[in-house]
Image (cartoon, helix red, strand yellow):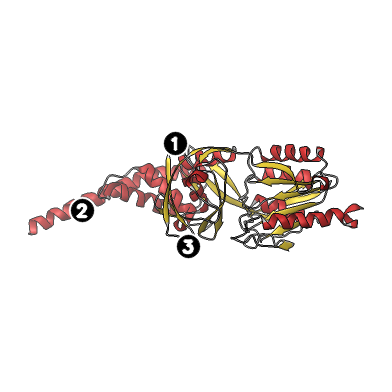
Amino acid sequence: MNIKGKMNEISWRSVAVGFLLAVGLFLGIVIGVVHELKIDGTKLAQVARFLMTMQFVESQYVNEVDSKTLIDGAIGGMVRSLDDPYSVYLPPDMLKRLQAQTSGEFGGIGVVMRFDNSRVFVQSVMDGTPGEAAGLMAGDEILAVDGVLTSDMEPEHVAMSIRGEKGTDVVLTIGREGEKDTDYTLTRDMIHYDTAAGTMIGNPDEGIGYIRVSSFSENTAKEFETSYNDLKEKGLNGLIIDLRGNPGGFVTTCVDIANLVVPKGTIVSVVQRDGTKEVYESKLEESTCPIVVLIDEGSASASEILAGALQDTGVATIVGRTSFGKGSVQVVMPIPGEADAVKLTIAKYYTPNGRSLMGTGITPDVDIEQPKDAVTDVQLEKAVEVMREKISSPVQAE
């Protein structure tokens, strides 16, 4: 009994000595790195804590562990500790999916999602896509993706988890009012879509144009301009811009579109932590026609920037429901040495009148809800009604 106890004591001493020697080696390396990066003593102590813990886990955990997996987990935990749903760690597969999404072509199921706190809903289903073939409907709640509850996932991860390579399957657990929760297995396909497309609506003689903008991707500004010019050639008298369910995208794309419809002046101000301000301005001499903008709870980020600029400058009437309220700007920083990245909130944005929309959103000038049981687009019908008033108004005619 005493011999066995002595052996255990010697064994643990060996472990402790080995651990301390390894820590000493790590600290020597860290001190050199710290010197190069000019890290202060307080931060150095925190780095040492991390490395000591990592070394302990690597050497003593009951199963063999991979150091890269530990580092990936540490980076992910670091970003999650910010308690910011828009700052996320993007492993290689998710980064690839994000890059594909912003190009306007990606592997997915063809649904536009709306995020309401920790709940995820189907905003709309694209024609000819796996989502339509499976019978998904607007208003469906996505409860889980491949068995993982969406309430435990960040919005970015929900979207990236649903997207993937063409031909692969994804299982969505769908909640539908009056029905039992059901699992749908969908096979992803390539989703090709124009992020901005326009048409004339209503009586042709009225000249009411309509452009639907589903996101602010790389090609959206060019698509918007093409549609806008086409409508003007057809006798455009008033323009309805539909931003419902638009989750945002590139600020620069939003600014390019704003330069086509927002009169000369400030579009948006982006303010960083140190107070550094970048102001984006429109060079358009004057608005060419009355504008109505449609928004809802799913309109966020760049959608709110465009709607806010049009509202503050008095150019447009905003119709619909209060927007999401995402008043921050993110950048994607690739991590050296690996094909992963961190998407980080780096600034807040403000409308021309200095409004921050974080948590409040854009309040519509005409508040109208789209009833779940409606057989027509009630909000669009209201937008057309408002546009007719604007076109016939003597003030607009001057």
Residue plotted at (47% across, 62% down): 178
Task: Give the Cα separation between the discs numbered 3 and 2.
Answer: 61 Å
Q: Residues within 10 Å of mark 2 (few under 14, many from 20)?
A: few
Q: Which one is earlier in the sequence, the residue at label 1 or at label 2?
A: 2
Residue 359 image-quadrant placement: bottom right
Mark 3, residue position: 178
Helix, strand or loop under label 3: loop
Mark 1, residue position: 167
The image's mark for residue 12 is 2
Q: Quadrant of the N terminus?
A: bottom left
Q: Amino acid at mark 1?
A: Gly
Along the line of sight, which residue is nearer the eye, 396 or 307? Answer: 396
Q: Nearer the viewer, mark 1 or mark 2?
A: 1
Q: Amino acid at mark 2?
A: Trp
Please indicate whether residue 251 sits to the left or right of residue 166 in the image: right
Along the line of sight, which residue is nearer the eye, 16 or 67? Answer: 67
Task: Give the Cα separation between the discs numbered 1 and 2.
Answer: 52 Å
Helix, strand or loop under label 2: helix
State the image coordinates of residue 248 (x, y, percent, origin top left): 63, 49
The answer to whether any part of residue 179 appears in the image is: yes
Q: Are marks 3 and 1 in contact (CB under 8 Å)?
A: no
Q: Residues within 10 Å of mark 1 (few under 14, many from 20)?
A: few
State the image coordinates of residue 388 (x, y, percent, origin top left): 81, 54
Q: Nearer the viewer, mark 3 or mark 1?
A: 3
